[in-house]
Amino acid sequence: MKTITRFRSALLLVLAPLACTLSLEACAAGDVAKGKDVFATECAECHSAREGKNKKGPSSFGIVGRKAATIADVEYSDALKSSGITWTPDKIDAYVTAPKKLVPGGKMKYDGLASAAERADLIAYLATLK
């Protein structure tokens, strides 16, 4: 029984950062509940948190770790399609900060979110959508 307990503890130590899919700093900094509120006010008009539910923009479900412009039935800009971006926490942060700077010629009509704390909260929330 002790061996199983030790194994579980070791497994949690190894998998916890992966389960979060964020850097340890971002996990510690981001508040999921606040991030859900940020999503509701900043993103939900155009993006859904539900799997398979696209709006004006693609669903944000499973975004962390997904390659950009890969959801079927969404009309992406040529700029985003050719960007080669994989939505890591750092790329999401850069994009939400200034979408037009990261992807010049992109279609997203959003000027950006200046607050680093709100972006960290948003990314923590997005990491739970899987």
Image: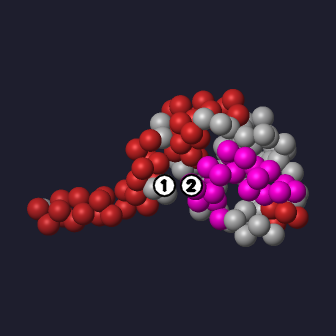
Image spot of residue 69 (x, y percent): 77, 62
Q: Main secondary structure of the magenta part?
A: helix
Q: Quadrant of residue 40?
A: top right
- Crowd tier of the residue under label 2, counting other residues whose Cα lies within 10 Å: few below 14, some 14–19, many 20 or above: many
Magenta stretch holds residue 103: yes
Residue occupying the far left of the picture: 2
**Range shown magenta:** 86-106
Image spot of residue 35 (x, y percent): 56, 36
Q: Closer to the camera, 124 or 60?
A: 124
Residue at the (58%, 56%) spot, across then down: 90
Q: Earlier in the sequence, mark 2 or mark 1?
A: 1
Say how many tags the image has: 2
Residue at the (83%, 57%) spot, across then down: 104
Q: Is disc 1 placed on a helix, strand or loop?
A: loop
Image spot of residue 18 (x, y percent): 43, 61
Q: Closer to the camera, 11 or 53?
A: 11
| Marks 2,1: beta carbons within 8 A | yes
User: Disc 2 residue type?
Assistant: Pro
Q: Quadrant of residue 56?
A: top right
User: Disc 1 residue type?
Assistant: Leu
Q: Judge left or right: residue 104 versus residue 128.
A: right
The residue where tag 1 is placed is 22
Q: Quadrant of residue 23?
A: bottom left
Residue at the (53%, 42%) spot, across then down: 120
The residue where tag 2 is placed is 89
Q: Judge left or right: residue 73 versus residue 120.
A: right
Numbered mark located on residue 91 in the image: none
Magenta stretch holds residue 96: yes
